[in-house]
Image: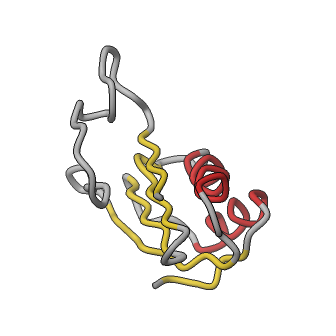
Amino acid sequence: MTTETDTPQAAGSCCSSTGSCGEGAPDAQAGGVTTVYEVKGMTCGHCEGAVSEEISGIEGVTSVKAEAATGRVTVASTAALTDEAVRAAVDEAGYELVGRA
């Protein structure tokens, strides 16, 4: 099970800010950055949602895809994020950021 969060969502779109409904890793916006992190402690869809929600709150984040089965969280953003910002968001969700995958 995976949870993917796109922010902001385009008006009238059912899925993402680009209007796509496909599966897979989020695509970075033009000039954007995609980074994969390893998060310890995610075991279910609720965990994925909690981590995705907190990371989505970081300024510049355009999408988040968390996968409990692998412990991987893929984050697309308009610019590189600091590890400290991502760590704080993951901590707030109640999990541990191991580092970049």
Compared to residue 65, the image places residue 84 above or below, namely below
In the image, taking residue 60 as reference, residue 86 lies left or right, namely: right
Compared to residue 38, the image places residue 53 above or below, namely above
Residue at x 23%, y 30% (from the top left corner): 19
Depth order, front residue of 99/82: 99
Residue 88 horizontal/vertical position (percent) = 73, 64
Residue 54 horizontal/vertical position (percent) = 65, 51
Depth order, front residue of 48/26: 48
Depth order, front residue of 44/37: 44
Residue at x 46%, y 85% (from the top left corner): 101
Query: Which coloring applies here?
Result: secondary structure
Residue 60 horizontal/vertical position (percent) = 47, 48
In the image, taking residue 23 as reference, residue 49 lies left or right, namely: right
Residue 32 horizontal/vertical position (percent) = 30, 57
Compared to residue 7, the image places residue 13 above or below, namely above
User: Could you say which quadrant of the image residue 20 lies in?
Assistant: top left
